[in-house]
Amino acid sequence: MNTSNNTVQDLLKAKFEAVKDWLIRYSKIVMPVVLAVCIVITVVTAISANKRKVEQEETAVSAEDMDAAGTMITVPQVPLEQDAVPGMNEFIQTYYNAMAEGDTDTLSKIVEYMDATELIRAVEMSKYIESYPTLEVYTKKGPREGTYLTYVYTEMKFYDYERPVPGMKVLYVCTDGNGDFYINEDGEEDENELHYMRELNLQDDAIDLNNRAAVAYNDMVDEDVELATFLLELNEEIDKNVGEALARAEGSDQGEEGEGTEDTPEEGGETGAQTEAPSMVVTKVKAIDVVNIRTSDSETADKVGKAAVGDEFTLLEEKGNGWSKVEYDGGEAFIKSEFLEASETEVASADGEEESEPENEPEPEEDNSSNTPAASATSTVTVKENVRIRSRASETSDKLATAYTGEKLNVIMKQADGWTKIDYNGRTAYVKSEFVE
């Protein structure tokens, strides 16, 4: 046994001596190779360590981003459902019945908040509304328990017009402590709520419903000159009546202070309410982006040129389908209206005379909403971020409502002062242009 072990040890020793002799003999070749291998191992180790450090840092940053994003409500793909919420259809019917009847008591109870101007407008509008023969109610669950974004497709029947007019309105419906619905118009939503509603309105089914209503309205107005004229005249009449009612209310509040009211006769036997400011008509527009100029109002039409930012054109017609007809190269051409803004207007005075005014001239502080629009509201813009609808082109003017992301608004005129004049429920109103497209 011992003899066997000794034999193995002798063999190993002989092998070791042979390797040693070989290394000594070829040391000039072996040592550089060994050194190179050590360097490679060191470099690989350093790269691996650095990569792990970078990955750890990126993971930490991602975690921070996730924590920051976690403060916002997660917005699921909420389906648009028709007639899905018990009692909602009856509530919406009550709201539109009250609008048609001018029932301010009911409106004050179910809408939070509806100011005096809007209540007066509801009464005035009710004089022209016969009924709402079509009310289609769709809902998406809102950001909080018991809240809903309610999309109402309507057809409104006027006494003085045969065909019902299509439209759509988005209402933020909440539930109070007693489980009763109310429409939230107070404009006090927090960032989470606004983010949630904005994302809901951008979901495909909500956009499709908006487009359906906008296309139906635009097609109807486009093909029916009588309707366009009717809506324009109705808008002016309502604005005038509301202004007179507000003036009377203000006069009665002033009592015997001697201020007078809009009904007090002025010189020449005319009342203040009958004096109208000149109307503004857009005569020139300029491009706000690089855009193709085409032979007709279609994106498939032949291109005849390209407008650069700031290029100015004489406006011949702003069409209801989102295109503007302009003078170009001695003839007529078409540009998408969304890429244009007014650069010059003409002021038509009461005696019919016209005076050209550049758009960069300061506008009078007093914006009489009864001015005749340049054209009826036959084109639309899409709300790209929740925005307040106001009675005048001023951030301090009365808030009429909130327009939510994805909602379509009927445009009267895009102004150079950063505001877009719209037709809102039959009246002239304004939104900041930066929030619509």
Image (cartoon, grey):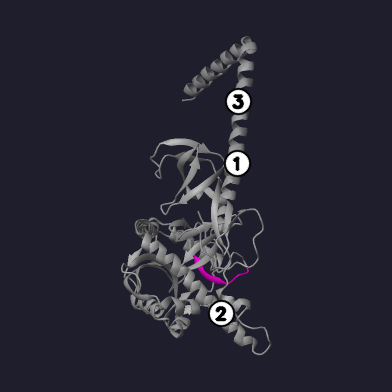
Which residues are the magenta region?
A: 396-403
Please name the residue that numbered disc 1 is placed on. Answer: 54
Question: How far across and how far down the image is residue 312, in percent?
Answer: 57, 44
Residue beneath the point at 45% across and 41% down: 333
- Is residue 301 visible from the viewing direction of this image? yes
Residue type at mark 1: give it.
Val
Disc on the earlier residue, 3 or 2: 3
Q: Secondary structure at mark 1?
A: helix
**Residue at 43%, 58% in the rendered image:** 378
Q: How far apart are the alpha carbons under marks 3 and 2?
A: 87 Å
Query: What residue appears at the point 50 percent right and 76 percent down from the top-left corner?
Result: 241
The local secondary structure at tag 2 comes to: helix
Return the residue at label 3.
Answer: 40
Pick whichever, 379 or 202, lies toward us: 379
Among all residues in the image, which is located at the extreme front? 268
Magenta stretch: dominant SS?
strand
Front-most of residues 178 and 358: 358
In the image: residue 175, left or right of residue 30? left
Q: Which residue is mark 2?
A: 246
For discs 1 and 2, the disc positioned in front in the rendered view:
2
Residue 134: name its quadrant: bottom left
- Could you tell me how far apart the alpha carbons at marks 3 and 1 are, in whole angstroms? 21 Å
Q: Amino acid at mark 3?
A: Val
Instruction: Kindly identify the residue that appears in the image at 62 percent across and 33 percent down.
Output: 46
Q: Which mark is residue 43?
A: none
